[in-house]
Image: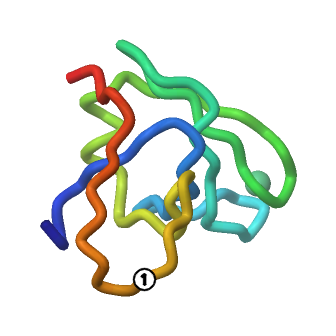
Amino acid sequence: MAGEKSFQYGDIVEMKKPHPCGANAWTIIRMGMDIRIKCTRCGRSVLLPRSKFERSLKRVLQRADSAPPVGEGASSAPRDSN
Ligand SMILES: [Zn+2]
């Protein structure tokens, strides 16, 4: 399902607005009602309500379980809560 905004703990994501430090790559360090992301460059973390995070999310740069992008069709998703 390409194009779908799915994300999980540990993913590195790109947001619609880059961080003032110049980077636009964030690691998801907390999942829940709120999402906490951490700038990969300066290390500052930001807490966003899930709905706001989803609106601000541009794309996922790197999956936490970084499977190489080959069409293996291995959907070994670890118990995804909601
Ligand atoms: Zn930053």
> Which quarter of the image is occupied by the C terminus?
top left
Q: Is 5 drawn above or below residue 49 in the view shown?
A: below
Q: Is 13 drawn above or below residue 71 in the view shown?
A: above
Q: In this figure, which colouring scheme has been used for the structure?
A: rainbow
> Which quarter of the image is occupied by the N terminus?
bottom left
Q: Secondary structure at mark 1?
A: loop
Spot the residue most to the right: 42
Pick the residue in front: 70 or 25. 70
Whole-percent x, y for residue 70 in the image: 38, 86
Task: Give the number of marks.
Answer: 1
Query: What residue do we see at 42% from left, 63% from top?
Result: 60
Whole-percent x, y for residue 16 in the image: 40, 63
Q: Is 77 drawn above or below residue 40 in the view shown?
A: above
Pick the residue in front: 22 or 36. 36
Whole-percent x, y for residue 6 in the image: 27, 50
What residue would you read off at disc 1?
69
Quadrant in the picture for residue 46: top right
Query: What residue do we see at 54% from left, 51% from top?
Result: 11
Spot the residue most to the bottom: 70
Q: Is residue 7 left or right of residue 5?
A: right
Q: Amino acid at mark 1?
A: Pro
Spot the residue most to the top: 33
Q: Is 8 drawn above or below residue 16 in the view shown?
A: above
Q: Is residue 44 left or right of residue 67?
A: right
Classify mark 1 as within 8 Å of ligand 1 or not, answering yes or no: no
Which image quarter has ligand 1?
A: bottom right
Pick the residue in front: 17 or 26. 26
Pick the residue in front: 5 or 71. 71
Query: What residue do we see at 28% from left, 42% from top?
Result: 54
Query: What residue do we see at 29% from left, 84% from top?
Result: 71
